[in-house]
Image: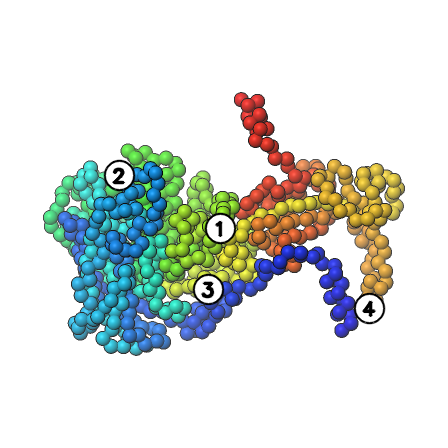
């Protein structure tokens, strides 16, 4: 015991002191996430007792083009797979968010200015009113009896006539209608109609259009948080049987498989679709520009009904218009052949015909390789204005040319939007996280793979890198929120950076610089496959990435996801040493080093500003016997001296100025022009979260040292990453140089 105490005292006295408060940056995050249980295991996988509810839908709906309204009837079969008996259900009524009396209307951008456009004023005040929100005509049980309901804004409580016991199911029949809103009249218009004055036609984007079951789960019971536009959706999986009645000359793009093509499509259109199913290298036009222009002029007063089915999806959306052109091609995946299809008005030409379906194909291939094969039969991109919005098998995507011309930047944005929204089929349409609560879990993970797709398939395009997040992370800490902030609690000006870009950069750092690509890719795929068609929480992702990599990442989650700290490492000092060689002339060594030998003076407390004064020569004395304690063997001291003879020893001091701990990459540039990189793991910060010293031995003399030379860790201040320090030019010097150059 005496030996142990001596050992501990030695290290207690010799380790570098941390004279600032310990913040526990490497402590486990167990108290910050939900504890594991029989439903969700400590490994991050669903437990043996995991359960989730299910809801199947049979829907009949009709669009009235004259009144821009939709009416429908649905039967929901709800399966109670939970261990609980339920006396009431919650149903989502998201269309109510557009009602004028809604508490959140106008709140997204509610600041008056001394100069404001008429459209901004409309967003703020709703000066031109418009009808919106559901009319619920009836809610009945399987026997046709009325069921009492209570509507609270975007949620409807259904008070069951009899208890729904665990393991049983119940059926509800709901009849409803609502005015389809003009998307140009308010912000965050994910759905509604877009009017084209030139040809007096409309494109309908129909989404969160039917009363939908809220999620009931093991972590919070009913997820009945109100819809406030920013935080999107939490939904149960089920099968859909949907009939949609529209004007006869309309074309519908929809979730699911068309069941009555014989009566809906022309013989020519069906033939072209058959050709497209065999075309793997280019799209086939199903409806051409000329045919779409003919449709635009018809304005049929007759109707027809399209029938679709969709299996094991969490939502259903569609688009309808007589303006649509339509192209399609087949995409072969290892376990599935998918029909990639694009629908667009002539206003999207030529770029939509050139790029949309190809972008779908690229997304399907890259995402499938990174996670699991896309399981559905179709994947559709519909052109619209101003937004990108995702649903199972279909997405609404902005980006249009002006008079047929589109800038390179706008084209990249359009293609990126299509890839991103197609990618949402994985997150959250299949790996079904709670968007209402954790926007970053689908937007962040999806943007990560979206950027990987762009990098691999469009290498000439701009993409997100750690440098992209620096302006945000350098921002005012008084208003910044952590990633682990509920969706509706983030600022409109920040949610893109905080919920899309910051998680993306975090995952890029894990993959490229912390875990390694091969191991990370396996872990990411493991998470996707564990939780497909299920409802993961943040803790399930965090635990799976650790479980599948044998890597402690709590330090990373704690800093990157739970704080607003930033990365700012300062290369505070680099000291250069050489060992005194006994067989050399001491005066020669003094002359070469230009400094005193360490044994002739006290410790050198001053920081050198560069390497001009040469190395400090240090003496290496014999180790006394008592320093070995009870060890009887002795180190080969001549061999130690031999190995260090002529070598350059560098002591590096690095300070953590930003608060986030990260691995350290050090670039050494030698006097002969060559360079090499050393990497220190994040563990280097465990015992001192503010400052570290590390010693390196180099054969060559160093002229310059850089931290994070490849910008892997989003360091917010690169001016303090170099030794010797580079002089910053004053504003006057910069101006003078520019003037001289001119």
Q: Position of 13 compared to 402: left or right?
A: right
Seen at 70% across and 37% down, the residue is 672
Q: CA distance from mark 2 to mark 1?
A: 44 Å
Check disc 3: other Cα within 10 Å, few if <14, some if 14-19, many if 20+: many
Q: Mark 1 = which residue?
A: 478
Q: In terms of sequence position, does the residue under pointer 4 or pointer 2 come before the other?
A: 2
Q: CA distance from mark 4 to mark 2?
A: 86 Å
Q: Position of 65 compared to 231: left or right?
A: left
Tell which of 740 and 636 is nearer to you: 740
Q: CA distance from mark 3 to mark 2?
A: 44 Å
Q: Residue furthest front?
A: 114
Q: In terms of sequence position, does the residue under pointer 1 or pointer 4 come before the other?
A: 1
Q: Residue 30 at x, y = what percent?
A: 52, 66
Q: CA distance from mark 3 to mark 4?
A: 49 Å
Q: In terms of sequence position, does the residue under pointer 3 or pointer 4 come before the other?
A: 3
Q: Mark 2 = which residue?
A: 347
Q: In terms of sequence position, does the residue under pointer 3 or pointer 2 come before the other?
A: 2
Check disc 1: other Cα within 10 Å, few if <14, some if 14-19, many if 20+: few
Q: Mark 3 = which residue?
A: 540
Tell which of 721 and 13 is nearer to you: 13
* Whether residue 698 can be seen here: no
Which type of secondary structure does the marked residue at label 1 adopt? loop
Closer to viewer: mark 3 or mark 2? 3
Check disc 2: other Cα within 10 Å, few if <14, some if 14-19, many if 20+: some
């Amino acid at each position: 015991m005496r030996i142990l105490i001596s050992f501990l005292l030695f290290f207690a006295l010799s380790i570098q002191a941390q004279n600032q408060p310990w913040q526990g940056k490497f402590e486990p995050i167990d108290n910050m996430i939900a504890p594991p249980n029989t439903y969700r295991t400590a490994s991050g996988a669903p437990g043996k007792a995991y359960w989730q509810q299910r809801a199947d839908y049979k829907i009949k709906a009709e669009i009235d083009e004259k009144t821009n309204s939709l009416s429908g009837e649905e039967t929901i079969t709800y399966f109670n797979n939970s261990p609980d008996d339920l006396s009431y259900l919650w149903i989502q009524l998201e269309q109510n968010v557009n009602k004028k009396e809604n508490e959140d209307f106008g709140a997204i951008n509610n600041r008056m200015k001394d100069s404001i456009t008429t459209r901004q004023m409309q967003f703020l005040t709703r000066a031109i009113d418009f009808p919106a929100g559901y009319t619920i005509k009836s809610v009945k049980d399987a026997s046709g009896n009325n069921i009492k309901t209570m509507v609270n804004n975007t949620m409807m409580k259904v008070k069951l006539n009899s208890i729904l016991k665990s393991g049983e199911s119940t059926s509800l029949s709901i009849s409803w209608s609502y005015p389809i809103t003009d998307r140009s009249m308010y912000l965050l218009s994910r759905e509604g109609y877009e009017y084209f004055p030139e040809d007096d036609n409309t494109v309908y984007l129909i989404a969160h259009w039917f009363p939908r079951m809220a999620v009931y789960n093991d972590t919070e019971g009913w997820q009945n948080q109100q819809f406030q536009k920013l935080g999107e959706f939490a939904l149960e999986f089920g099968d859909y049987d949907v009939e949609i009645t529209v004007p006869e000359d309309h074309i519908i793009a929809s979730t699911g498989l068309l069941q009555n093509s014989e009566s809906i499509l022309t013989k020519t259109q069906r033939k072209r679709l058959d050709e497209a199913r065999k075309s793997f290298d280019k799209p086939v036009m199903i409806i051409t520009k000329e045919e779409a222009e003919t449709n635009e002029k018809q304005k049929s007063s007759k109707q027809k009904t399209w029938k679709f089915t969709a299996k094991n999806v969490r939502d259903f959306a569609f688009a309808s218009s007589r303006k649509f052109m339509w192209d399609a091609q087949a995409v072969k995946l290892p376990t599935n052949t998918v029909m990639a299809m694009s629908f667009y008005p002539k206003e999207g030409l030529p770029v939509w015909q050139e790029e949309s379906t190809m972008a779908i194909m690229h997304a399907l291939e890259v995402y499938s390789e990174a996670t699991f094969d896309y399981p559905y039969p179709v994947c559709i991109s519909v052109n619209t204005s101003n937004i990108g919005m995702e649903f199972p098998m279909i997405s609404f995507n902005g980006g249009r040319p002006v008079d047929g011309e589109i800038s390179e930047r706008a084209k990249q944005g359009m293609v990126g939007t299509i890839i991103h929204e197609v990618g949402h089929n994985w997150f959250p349409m299949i790996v079904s996280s709670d968007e209402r609560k954790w926007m970053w879990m689908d937007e962040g993970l999806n943007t990560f793979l979206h950027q990987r797709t762009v990098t691999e398939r469009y290498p000439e395009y701009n993409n997100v890198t750690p440098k992209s997040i620096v302006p945000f992370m350098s921002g005012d800490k008084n208003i910044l929120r952590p990633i682990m902030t509920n969706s509706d609690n983030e600022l409109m000006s920040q949610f893109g950076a905080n919920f899309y870009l910051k998680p993306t950069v975090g995952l890029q750092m894990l993959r490229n610089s912390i875990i390694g690509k091969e191991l990370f890719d396996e872990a990411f795929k493991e998470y996707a496959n564990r939780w497909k068609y299920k409802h993961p929480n943040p803790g399930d992702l965090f635990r799976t990435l650790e479980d599948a990599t044998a890597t402690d990442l709590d330090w990373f989650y704690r800093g990157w996801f739970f704080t607003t700290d930033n990365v700012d490492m300062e290369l505070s000092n680099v000291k250069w040493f050489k060992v005194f060689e006994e067989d050399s002339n001491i005066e020669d060594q003094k002359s070469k080093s230009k400094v005193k030998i360490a044994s002739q003076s006290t410790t050198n407390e001053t920081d050198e500003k560069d390497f001009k004064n040469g190395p400090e020569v240090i003496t290496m004395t014999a180790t006394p016997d008592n320093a070995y304690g009870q060890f009887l063997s002795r180190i080969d001291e001549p061999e130690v001296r031999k190995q260090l003879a002529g070598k350059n020893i560098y002591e590096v001091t690095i300070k953590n100025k930003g608060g986030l701990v990260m691995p350290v990459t050090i670039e050494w540039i030698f006097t002969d022009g060559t360079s090499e990189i050393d990497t220190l793991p994040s563990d280097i910060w465990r015992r001192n979260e503010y400052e570290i010293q590390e010693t390196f031995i180099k054969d060559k003399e160093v002229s310059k040292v850089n931290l994070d030379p490849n910008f892997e860790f989003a360091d917010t201040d690169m001016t303090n990453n170099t030794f010797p320090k580079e002089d910053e030019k004053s504003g006057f010097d910069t101006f003078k140089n520019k003037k001289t150059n001119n």
